[in-house]
Image: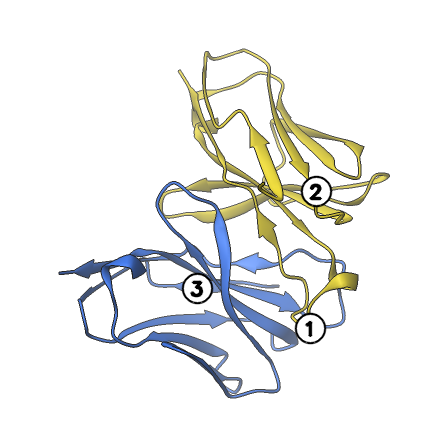
Amino acid sequence: GEDVEQSLFLSVREGDSSVINCTYTDSSSTYLYWYKQEPGAGLQLLTYIFSNMDMKQDQRLTVLLNKKDKHLSLRIADTQTGDSAIYFCAESISGSGNTPLVFGKGTRLSVIA
Amino acid sequence: DADVTQTPRNRITKTGKRIMLECSQTKGHDRMYWYRQDPGLGLRLIYYSFDVKDINKGEISDGYSVSRQAQAKFSLSLESAIPNQTALYFCATSDPSRDRGIGNEQYFGPGTRLTVT
C-alpha cells in the first residue's frame, strides 16, 4: 500500500535554510510532488521531481530524492516570512495513471522574523 | 478568473441537515476529486471521478455522496450532517493526458469551510 509520512511542524529563523522531509512507501512512484498551502487558500504545486532524478533545483528550492531509502526532502534557502505555510509531499504511482495522488499529512513551516 | 471554484466558501449548518458543496472547473479536465482537510490529518480523499460516468470511493466516503453532473461540475453531498464532518473541503482536478510532463498534477480549488453544530 501507499503511505507518505512527514513531520508536522518546523520552525526556522528568517534567512536560514529550511529542510522539510518526507518518506514514502511505494517504490514504483514515478513522480513526487511538493505542494504549498498558504493560510486560507488551496494547495498549489510548488515543485516536483521525476523518479529517475536525484536532485532538482529551482531558484531557492532544492529537492533531493533518495530512492533507496524512499526519502524526499525540500530545502528552501534564505527562508522568508512569506514561506510560512503548510507543505505537502505527494506521490504518483507508477504505471497506474488511474489512481489519485497520495498526500502526506503536511508540515507546517513557521518562519520567525 | 479562478480555474477551479467552490461554493459556498463558508457554511455553518446544523446536525441532521442535508448540505451540498459545489465545484466547477474551466480547465477542461476529466478528473475531479473531493478531499477533506483536518488539522494533523492532512488531506483525505472522499470521492473521485475520472469522467462523467465514473465515480469512485476514496479513503473516507462514508456519510458522503457525489454527483458528476457534467465534465465541469462535481458536487459533494452530506445527506445528514454530523459535527465530526466539520472540516475544510477541497475540490481538485487533473488530466494526465494534458500534463506538462509532470504526471498527474492536481489543481485545487480555494476550499469550503464547513461547520456542523
Q: CA distance from mark 2 to mark 1?
A: 21 Å
Residue located 56% across and 71% down the image: A32
Q: CA distance from mark 1 to mark 3?
A: 25 Å
What is the x, y in percent for residue A91?
58, 66
The circle drawn on residue A5 is 3
Please say which color scheme the image uses.
by chain
Q: Nearer the viewer, mark 2 or mark 1?
A: 2
The answer to whether B65 is drawn above or below residue A66 in the figure is above
**How many residues crowd around disc 3 within 10 Å: few (fewer than 14), some, or many (20 or more)?**
some
Where, quadrant-wise, is the C terminus of chain A in this rendering?
bottom left
Residue located 25% across and 76% down the image: A17
For mark 2, what is the residue? B26
Three-letter amino acid code at the position of disc 3: Glu
Q: Nearer the viewer, mark 1 or mark 3?
A: 1
For mark 1, what is the residue? B101
The answer to whether A105 is drawn above or below residue B89 in the figure is below
Q: Are marks 2 and 3 in contact (CB under 8 Å)?
A: no
Q: CA distance from mark 2 to mark 3?
A: 33 Å
